[in-house]
Image (cartoon, rainbow, N blue to C red):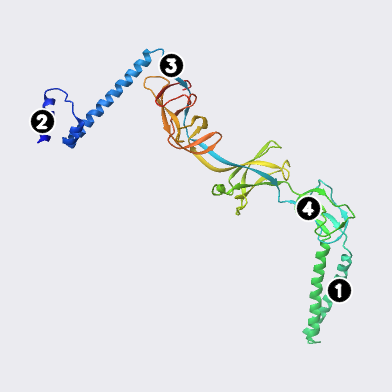
Amino acid sequence: MKKYLFLFSLMLLTQCGGEAPVNIDELITNGSLADIQNLKTQKQKELNSLKQDIDQLDAAIRSQNSEKKLLLGTDILITPQEFKHYVSFQGTIDTDQNLVLYPELPGLLKAIYVKEGQRVKKGTLLVRLSDGGMQDQLEQLRLQLELAKTTYERQGKLWDQKIGSEIQYLQAKTAYKTLQKSVSQMQDQVAKTQIRAPFDGIVDHIIADKGANLAPGATPILRFVNLDRMQVAGEIPEKHLPNIQKNSQAKVDVPVLGKQWVSKVSLVGNYINPNNRSFRVEIDLDNKEGNLKPNMTAQVLLNDYMNPEALLVPLKNILKNQDGRSYVFVLEPIADEKDTYKAVKTFIETGAEANNKLEIINGLKAGDRILQEGVRLAKDQQLIKIINS
């Protein structure tokens, strides 16, 4: 009964042309869903009308109050652009073709056929050692081999005619095969007295002197290098392993030369060093001009992330609140007021950083304008006069 009395009173006041001061708590308790929705719609219209009135009044106050000073600033238009992030490390330049040549046999250094700095082809004779009579032994073995071959062939013909014994034929065959092996082994030994270039390269340094007594594997003869292709190698923390692959872009800066090389990763190590939790990376470098030398130091930048359509904001234009959340001031234009904007505090999510810029993952979209100069002085909902739009 109480509900019907409430509705009757509301209808009576409406018909009389007056605006009934509705008690919202009473309406929620006794009114129907339709009545509540109607009142909400009415209040929303009133709120929108009030907001329009307030905006008009604010505009009038700003236009008539000549003493009011707006904060001046500049803006940035957010547009998609390519973004690359790099991992930095220091590496050492070297080459795989950097050898110190040692003798395999003991002997005297009989002859040196090259000079320091001379460029030679693969297989060129560099030095010769004394053979200790091995060449004479080789000639004797060759003579014995010729006799053994003749004996073997004749014994074979006799055996084909069923003349002689099988054991004589087999002995001749064995003697011939054995001498073949002996000649081959002696040829290998004699060849070791002649040291030849293992690849195309340069005689960098002749270490031993002619006539020196050389010990196998202990006395260095000369250093032989090829610097046409170099590598820079270094170690990177294991946390970057998922983002570094073969052929990843690399920038190599050599401070002592003041030059930079752009190359690609040629090797990604498969072993994590337990001492520093890092893995090895190598990058090939073209050194046709010969500027790079072994053991030079280089600063390397490895591309570990790329976004072709990134939204970037300079670090200086990103602020943080007491909770550590990052935000910027997005500029919303004021109707009918040229170059005047409202600064709206907008929280953002950031990604990678490079070149003093942060990638924005969430919170901004292409086409937004944010406050640049004056960002440290701005407050939320403050009016800003942009002087570079």
Q: Which of pointers 2 and 4 indicates the residue nearer the eye?
A: 2
Q: What kind of residue is marked 1?
A: Gln
Instruction: Measure the alpha-carbon separation of dots 4 and 3.
Output: 78 Å
Choose between 102 and 136: the one closer to the eye. 102
At horizontal 69% and vertical 45% (from top left) the residue drawn is: 93
Which residue has dot 3 on it?
69
The first of marks 2 and 3 along the sequence is 2
Instruction: Measure the alpha-carbon separation of dots 2 and 4.
Output: 110 Å
Tell me: residue 2, above or below residue 113: above
Judged from the image, the secondary structure of the residue bearing numbered disc 2 is helix
Which residue has dot 4 on it?
100
Tell me: residue 63, above or below residue 294: above
Instruction: Measure the alpha-carbon separation of dots 1 and 2.
Output: 138 Å
Q: Is residue 263 left or right of residue 163?
A: left
The first of marks 3 and 1 along the sequence is 3
Which residue has dot 2 on it?
8
The first of marks 2 and 4 along the sequence is 2
Q: What kind of residue is marked 2?
A: Phe
Quarter of the figure with the N terminus: top left
Q: Which of pointers 4 and 1 indicates the residue nearer the eye?
A: 4
Q: Position of residue 361 (x, y in %)?
A: 46, 38
The first of marks 1 and 2 along the sequence is 2
Q: Position of residue 172 (x, y in %)?
A: 81, 80
Q: Position of residue 336 (x, y in %)?
A: 37, 19
Choose between 140 and 28: the one closer to the eye. 28
Q: Position of residue 95 (x, y in %)?
A: 71, 48
The first of marks 4 and 1 along the sequence is 4
